[in-house]
Amino acid sequence: MSMNNQGRPSQPGAAQDNDIPTISGDRGLDLEAALIFEIGRGGVTGVDLPDVRVNEKRLGELRRKGAVGLPGLSEPEVIRHYVRLSRQNYAIDAGLYPLGSCTMKHNPRLNEKMARLPGFGDLHPLAPRAATQGALQLIDQLMTWLTTLTGMPAVAMSPKAGAHGELCGLLAIRAAVEARGEKRNRILVPESAHGTNPATAAFAGFTVDEVPAKPNGHVDAAALKAKLGPDVAAIMLTNPNTCGLFEGEVIEIAKAVHAAGAYFYCDGANFNAIAGRVRPGDLGIDAMHINLHKTFSTPHGGGGPGAGPVVLSERLAAYAPLPLLLADKDGFRLIEDRAELPAGAKPFGRMCAFHGQMGMFVRALSYMLSHGRDGVRQASEDAVLSANYILASLKDVMSAPFGEGPCMHEALFDDTFLEGTGVTTLDFAKAMIDEGYHPMTMYFPLVVHGAMLIEPTESESKESLDRFIAVLRGLAEEAKAGKRERFEGAPRYAPRRRLDETAAARKPVLRWKPDPLPQAAE
Amino acid sequence: MRYLPLTPDDRRAMLARIGAPNIDALFRDVPREAVVPLSVFDLPETQGELEVERALSKLAAKNVAAGSAPSFCGAGAYKHHVPSAVDHLIQRSEFLTAYTPYQPEIAQGTLQVLFEFQSQVALLTGMDVANASLYDGSTATAEAVLMAQRLTRRGKAILSGGLHPHYAETVETVASLSGQVTRAPVTPGKAEDIAALIDNDTACVVVQSPDVFGLIRNLRPIAEAAHAKGALLIAVVTEAVSLGLLESPGAQGADIVACEGQSIGNGLNFGGPYVGLFAAREKFLRQMPGRLCGETVDAAGKRGFVLTLSTREQHIRREKATSNICTNSGLCALAFTIHLSLLGEEGLARLARINHARASALADRLARLPGVELMTPSFFNEFTLKLPKAAAPVVDALAQKGILAGVPASRLMPHEAGARDLLIVAATETNTDDDFAALEAALKWSVGESQSDQKEVLA
């Protein structure tokens, strides 16, 4: 019997043959965790604090009258609870995490340690200038890395994630268009774009006009050019695009966009494919966000926090939001007030309180200093090499719509190879879970039917890639051989079987509620 | 390079399988003129851990950490003690290095945490439902205003003068695209008559309590006035610990609550990453921004959790989504949830009482100094003093003496003439009696200097 990398039998049904329900509901190392509200109780706490009385005269007669309703737990119970929960998660530290477009690369622990230095982690955002010079210098160094790697003159540091960076870029474009006394309300967005692109364009008050993709996965440059006009404010192009392909006509597109008086926003989600080899500034890009949590490995943390600084061209730099970072004879300072702006600065506003995701800045700079320019370039090359290796190793058994290659940092497959098997992209992905892998990105990009987008990143060894390839080949062959049972019930060996998402949406239960006993009114 | 597992032999073998002569061949779609040599990047080469640690530690040492000095800075970010268990747990690989839980069968850890988080936030704010978090308090406030504009189909948002100015600027940046944003006058230590500004075009009023000066605001009459005109009340909280002692915004009639969750579980981090708490009345659920986690069952009938109602979100709805947000503040939300689980009902209540008692004791001491006046008759753990001279130079002078005295109001509202002499001072459970004595003595020195200046002028 073959074993997968979780040490479980990988023959379907083999585990079920021995599947005697346990009395506890736990199964060996698979440990269940009730909700904290179900295990907590009154009279217990995990933090020892003195019981002080307060004088109510300064509470404006607004002292809380009822209990909050929080459960009480001791420290060992809290630790056990969250350790048990953690073990129900897949993680990049545990295995290959080939989510296309998400860039699940290794998260170095040095970066965690650096972000926790008290001078960064315990620094108040509004501490006096003299107390924050090292932090401002760190931001300045990171800005130098970002502008140098992108070949762009300016960068806005405050956006808190990629989508927030998109918003920042489009607001700068809006301000630039308005400063020219023009009205341009349309944004061109390829249909292969991330969902955030059209959502951001709408959020920033623009109308969205979709540009079709060509059958070869590239944006239809002719169609794009035909749509340009005096009401177009910008295009939003992802490059490398979401099919994992470099848009080779990008320079021509940029020229046409600029000739039409519009701006070129680039979604930098895939910058990790080209960092250290290609500078977006050389491609004619006016604004691009950089997902520090992708290219520069700040941890994804189960969905955030991210960070999305936006590099800006000369044409847009003046519109960067507050605060601005300046160096003068006394060191670094933040410009937070319009009255103190340097000549020419016309910030469009403010993206958030304070000055951005400092904790992510420290981690990203730690990554950059560790890699150096040579390591950044090598990482991009290894990411692209690994994706092409997967494409070349699987295109005979899985269908690759653009399989002639080369691809960039991710390899795109579709569901043509599953035609007639009764197995869907979803089934195929869930079967990967039983094999000990996180599935690839499914059903995205939308321009390909049943898309499966695989991004191995530069963090995998050749042995790891070979094993992954062998498993996917095996699954593809099983599907084609008509062995549907492996796929239909998958996953079998995960902490949960397939979850009913329809039921969750039909009658949403979004929080724990106390049993309907009479409660003291608050 | 220690993070890159491929060897030169591996790379050669892989290129051979691909059928490419070299790595450049894989980049052949890139226009030739756009490929640059490494030498164009004026940046350092690879360094070992030791060198990187040395370089970054040097930068960190130039800063004054809140825990290394008597520190009284607040105004939207608060120094609290975070139990050791919190940082240990959030650094577990399975939480730290997981992605968004799009594959729920192997992400139940993250999902159940989010369900617990949503439950805690709903309880704490006194609201029906909460989302899985937004970036921070300021962006949560901006999202709340956009949501109110959608719900009421009205454009006008009225911001209290006590709303943190960074929050107000964040709201203006996005909400002025979809309507108009009006700021009420700044009235330090007093509640403005915001109800008088509400009219039939008003989508929402946004009121922070405790406000940026620390003053506790009574939201009830504002909620009534807003509802009478068909407008919504958005309550903003920048100090989540206050909810352990003060009546919740939900109990006071708020329709949407936007709250900064940093002070539970999360460090100061020079301003981010933080965690935006976002809660609302159930009837507004479909217009909420951000991720939601919901309970369901798996194919074997076991309880489990999934991301749900994603038809509101950008990856499904694209330009028709309720927001463009694509992340939450996952790991910060986890830290919040673990810290709040450790505190529990009794721990949170005690922590909140200690904070108020500490701040109250400090306010009494400082208000006795000659020429110093306490501006905020009510407050939680933060209050505003009027000094007999401009506050910003006082703060800078005290920083030279190793004391972080607080936030001068003029830093947040430089054009507000009445803010020049105001100092916003926060005190939490982390401040010792020695800290109090140091601040008191230093302020006395600083104020005494000013009084002798005045005497000289008079003479």
Image: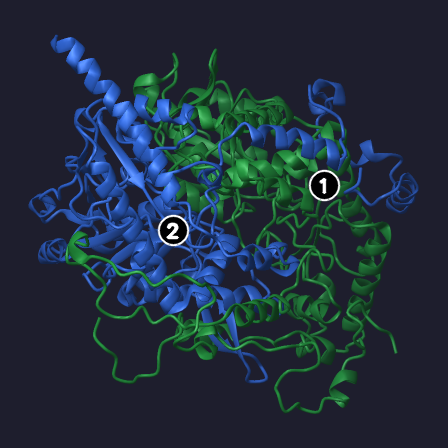
Chain colours: A green, B blue
Estimate the x, y position of residue A515 in percent, counting from the top left: 35, 83
| Of A268 and A220, the residue lying toward us | A268
Looking at this rendering, what residue extends furthest in the left direction? B196
Estimate the x, y position of residue B28 in percent, counting from the top left: 77, 32
**What residue sits 48% from the left and 76% below the top?**
B296
Estimate the x, y position of residue A228 in percent, counting from the top left: 46, 30
Helix or strand or loop: what does disc 1 sit on?
loop
Q: Residues within 10 Å of mark 1 (few under 14, many from 20)?
A: many
Q: Residues within 10 Å of mark 2 (few under 14, many from 20)?
A: some
| Of B367 and A190, the residue lying toward us | B367
- Is residue A311 shown left or right of residue A323? right
Checking the image for residue A408, the label placed there is 1
Name above or below for residue A522 compared with residue A448. below
Chain identifier of the residue bearing label 2 in the image: B
Name above or below for residue B108 compared with residue A218. below
**What residue sits 50% from the left and 49% below the top?**
A195
- Is residue A74 shown left or right of residue A275? left
User: Which quadrant holds the C terminus of chain B?
Assistant: top left
Residue A381: quarter of image = top right
| Of A242 and A514, the residue lying toward us | A514
User: Residue tagged by mark 2?
Assistant: B429
**What residue sits 85% from the left and 50% below the top?**
A462
Residue type, mark 2 in image: Glu
Residue type, mark 1 in image: Met
Whether residue A69 is visible, yes or no, is yes
